[in-house]
Amino acid sequence: MLQGKYMSKRSVDAVFQGLYLLTDIRGILRDTVPDHRLSPGQKKDAEKILGKLEKQVAILKEELLA
Amino acid sequence: MNCGEGIDTRQVDELFINLDPIQAGGRLTTDAMKAVLAYGDGYSVCDNCVKPFRLDHISKPPLADFHRDLADFLQMDVARLVPGARRGFQAVAGALVSPGDPVLLTAYSHYTEFLSVEQSRGIPFEIPADELHIITPDAAAARIEEVIRTTGKTPSLMFVEQVDYQYGNLHPVAKIAKVAHQYDIPVLCNGAYTVGIMEVNGKELGADFLTGSGHKSMAAPAPSGVLATTDEWADKVFRTTGIKGDLTGRTFGIKEVEMMGCTLMGVTSVGMMASFPHVKKRVKEFDRQLQHVNTIVDALLSIDGTKIQSEYPRKHTLTRMNTIDSFDKVAKTHKKRGFFLTSALRERGITGILAGSTRVWKFNSYGVSKEQADHVARSFIEIAEAEGLTITG
């Protein structure tokens, strides 16, 4: 969705949201060094984060490739 | 994988338990990593900078509030962001020390404290440590008396570390400051290893100046830090410019001279600010970190011949060990020589100890979980056993 004349605010938001979600995954990796064995709670969190990340990727495809 | 031409992607903290003595407390929080993504561009905090055009007045992002919150956090009156604690030393020495002034430091003062004295052309006098590697108020008093007697001048400043970088020992700053104040000597407390790690109350310490390091202990990108002071000293150390261009007549608003104007104009200040809520919380949980470091130290001490050179039980996570009579004996005949220890640790997902060290070395376990502390403790014992060292206790 274009914002004003030139901007695709939606795709920019999706990029940052995606980066933040990946950063949350990075945080989990840091918290679980060195074996990266996730607790049940961390697995649940990771699953949620990855689901949200897929949505952001879908938005980007829609905004930039459609 | 590169993040630029010839620049490896750094993955140390994603792959290893990192016990590096200077890196542990500066590891970014997830929020700070997000801030780095959004505010990496140069003058990124200046989008909404309006009159009077100074960092501590910017309200979006909320740097003005952050400055006030930092002062409150440290129980001081005024705070400024600085590019590392060292720039705080420099600012204070620049404001208080005149050429030829005696300045007190300690046997454990950081080299940048010395450099700040050198830059101001002061003369350094060190307060010695006792046999337990502690700077005592008695030693401070004796050195003050000696300096006054031999130079005929009262020192214009005293630097003292709350926790020192060599042993990670906690020094009685409040008592030392009390002594200094009896001679009207202002005290700069170097909290590079404490501010952001444990609760620090500048007023209780009797600090006239308190410095903290963002990249060492406040989960912030480098170079970042804080210099806080009292109302009594704020006008002196944060004096505003009065200079005028002789041809153009230009003046420079309310820029602060010792700060060289604005200090952290981008990712450093926002990274520090993003971590701050987490930092405020974590300082209250420092006891748990002490349990973890003591778990690791106890495991090391169970290896015959191993000694601790820091005070024990630990009051800080930065710790100095002596393994001359344990791991270093192994190193003498091991095919990897002194590198066997760090190599064996790396195989177990642990890094940060100076490669090749088997004699006297430091580690900092700040930030590890109980599981990680247990893994580190177990790893040291496994390595010792594998090399034929005796475990007792």
Image: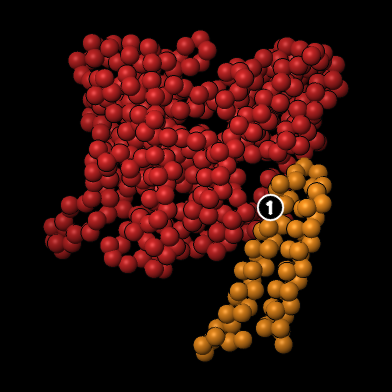
Instruction: From the viewer's side, name the closer residue of B239 and B3.
Output: B239
Q: Circle 1 is placed at which residue position?
A: A27
Which chain is displayed in red in the rendered image? B
Quadrant that contains the C terminus of chain B: top right
What residue is at 62 percent from the left and 54 percent from the top? Answer: B30
Q: Quadrant of residue B283?
A: top right
Q: Quadrant of residue A16?
A: bottom right
Quadrant that contains the N terminus of chain B: bottom right
Number of numbered discs on residues? 1
Q: Residue B323's spot in the image, x, y percent?
A: 69, 17
Answer left or right for B374 relative to B316: right
Q: Does residue B343 appear anywhere in the picture? A: no
Q: Residue B363's spot in the image, x, y percent?
A: 64, 29
**Chain A takes which shade in the image?**
orange
Instruction: From the viewer's side, name the closer residue of B49 and B40.
Output: B49
Q: Quadrant of residue B281?
A: top right
Element carrying mark 1: helix
Answer left or right for B148 relative to B274: left
What residue is at 81 percent from the left and 36 percent from the top? Answer: B347
- Find the residue positioned furthest to the bottom: A5
Vertical arrangement, residue B251 with respect to residue B161, above or below: below
